[in-house]
Structures are given as C-alpha cells and as structure tokens.
Amino acid sequence: MYQIEEPSYFIYLIAIPVIFAVFLLVSFWKGRKQKQFASSHLMKKLSPERSSFKPYLKIILFLIGLIFLIVSLTNPKMGTKLETVRRQGVDVVFALDVSKSMLAEDIAPNRLEKAKQIISKIIDKLGSDRIGIIIYAGNAYPLLPITTDHGAAKMFLQSASPDLVSSQGTAINDALEMANTFYNNDEQTNRFLFIISDGEDHQEDASSFIEKNTKDGINTYTIGIGTEKGGPIPIKKNGVLQAYKKDNKGETVITRLNESILKEIADKGNGKYLLGNKTQETVDYVEELLVKAEKSEFETTQFSDYKDQFQWFVGFALLFLVIDAFMFDKKTRWIQKLNLFNKK
C-alpha cells in the first residue's frame, strides 16, 4: 500500500502542459520564419542533417523526466508488511437519507450535499473510531461496512445519491434494522447511530426497532436537514434544471423538514435531535460527544514500516534527462542506413 507524504507538490504538474504549449508555439514561430527565409526544399539542402522528429522526442523525454522529479518531491512511500494493532475508539454508523426530497434546495447547495458536508467534517474529527455508512430511501443499503479507513469512508460518501436506491420512500425501519448488524464488536460499550434526514415520509412506527437497538447499546441521534418553509424538489438532467416534481393534481410538491418524527426517534433511542442547518455547530457537538464517550479496545490490521520510494523516481528522472541531454537534433545515421521507406 502506498502513501503520499507531500501531495501538495503535485501542483507543479501544471507546468508540464504549459512547457509543451510554449514548445509548440516556438516551433510554429520558427517554422514560419524559415519559410519566409527560404523554401522547404532549399532548407533541406542547407541543413540536410537536421531531423524534424528529434526536437519533439527530446521535449517528450524532458517532460517525462520532469514528471518523475515532481513525483519524487511528494515522497511516495510503500508499506512493507501488515501487522495487527490494538486501537481505542467507539463505533459510529451514519444512516443517510437519500430520498428525492433530500434534493430540495431550501438549504444550500441542497439537503443531501449539506448532509454529506456534516458527515465528512465529523469524519475529519474522528480519531481511532470505526465508521460505517448506510443509505436509505425506499430500502436501506450498506454503502460502507464498519471500518477504520476514514479516507475510504469519505470517498464512498461522495457517491451517495438517490440513484443508488432502487425505490423511493423513506424506509427508516430498514435503516434501523441494518444498523444493528453493523456493530460487529461485542465488547464495544459505546455505539452511536446518527440518522441524517429531513424527516419527510417517516410514517412507519419505528418504536420496536429503536427499542431493540437501545437494548443492544446503540445510542440513536438524529440530525435534521431542511427548513419548515420547505422547497420544491428539482428534476435535473446533467446538472441542468428541467422542472420541479409535481403531484397527481399537477401541483408542485413542497417538501418540509419534519422535526417531530426525528425528535421522537432520538428520544426513544437514548440520543438527541440536532438541527443540522448550521454545519459547524452540529460537528462541534458530535465531536465533543464522541471525545467524552468511553472508548473500547479493538484489533485492526494495517500496513506498517512505510519506506521512502522517492529514489526510484529520481533515478528514472535522471535517466530520461541524460538521454535528452545527449540526444542531438541531427538525424541518426544508423536509422538512415536502414532505409525503412526505400528512399533512393
């Protein structure tokens, strides 16, 4: 497994297309000036040994060498072995509502993106805690099994959308039942479930599922996203607004934040309801909650003994740059002798 110690140096890769563009412009300018000086036939007689191909090969070799040098600056490292380590933390599962109502834009940029921002910022605050993600609408699906890989969690989180769920609705019971299966460490004393939703269409009685989860040590918190005023549900194609969702009577559907059902779930789940419209306040509360929670030990495997690999990239960079330095613009005589194109 690889690690990049200084990824900020990748910004220098911008220089590669800039240098190549400057080379093409200079080559074009030189070509025009040569045509003004003499015809192409005369230029070949004046410089018969000059290769028209070599300058392009040289710039490509130079740029490849430069790319390797830039990559070496990032100091890539490779893990050489896996080892089992003991860590302390709590288990945190997020159940994210991805129903169509979460696309409403009464909260900028929309409810779903606001929910993702909150989860992402909470993940950034986690220490050795394990994390899992469930998405639900008409059904519930595991987006990410519980893991200590916070980077993977943020990557999978960005893919969450209504398109990943086959049927619409808000199957909160399915999400609660699935969450119970995520906590696979029997010794874990603190288990947290965060339901992030607008509360829309949560019609089913979830009491039995919440009661079971509470008995199993799962504290259920809810985070409401949206406003009481609400907003329409946009229908977009390739990011362009096409229309707003309408009901059977042809009237525009207005979706509103339903705080009452979310508060009820949190109260029964030994947790608390949080209004998530102010991202930082919500993140700060959750961070403090998890910091104060009693931690349990668990085993996990991870790569260790990461070794620097920059020297390989420096070596390849020097190889290409040396080849470039010793390559002249003249035609290669042994290739000419091959007479590949049967020239007389």
Image (tube, rainbow, N blue to C red):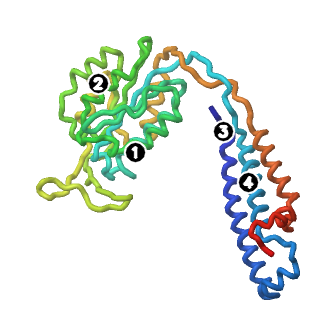
Give the mark, 3 or 4, whose residue is nearer the N terminus. 3
Q: Amino acid at mark 1?
A: Lys
Check disc 4 and report the residue beneath it.
Answer: 64
Give the mark, 3 or 1, whose residue is nearer the N terminus. 3
Check disc 2 and report the residue beneath it.
Answer: 177
Q: Residue furthest left?
A: 249
Q: Secondary structure at mark 2?
A: helix
Check disc 1 and report the residue beneath it.
Answer: 114
Check disc 3 and report the residue beneath it.
Answer: 4
- Would residue 187 be found to the left or right of residue 40 on screen? left
Give the mark, 4 or 1, whose residue is nearer the N terminus. 4
The spot of residue 293 in percent (x, y) is 46, 20
Give the mark, 1 or 2, whose residue is nearer the N terminus. 1
The spot of residue 296 in percent (x, y) is 49, 15
Is residue 151 shown to the viewer in this render?
A: yes
Give the mark, 2 or 4, whose residue is nearer the N terminus. 4
In the image, residue 166 sits, relative to residue 235, either above or below, namely: above
- Would residue 10 be found to the left or right of residue 41 on screen? left
Measure the alpha-carbon separation of dots 4 and 1.
Answer: 41 Å
Measure the alpha-carbon separation of dots 3 and 4.
Answer: 20 Å
- Would residue 301 be found to the left or right of residue 16 on screen? left
Q: Secondary structure at mark 3?
A: strand
Nearest-to-viewer mark from 1 and 2? 2
- Relative to the observer, which residue lies in front, 242 or 272? 242
Is residue 124 shown to the viewer in this render?
A: no
Name the image quarter holding the C terminus. bottom right
Measure the alpha-carbon separation of dots 3 and 1.
Answer: 29 Å
Q: Amino acid at mark 4?
A: Ile
Q: Amino acid at mark 2?
A: Glu
Q: Residue furthest top?
A: 187
Q: Residues within 10 Å of mark 1 (few under 14, many from 20)?
A: many
The answer to which image quadrant residue 323 occupies is bottom right
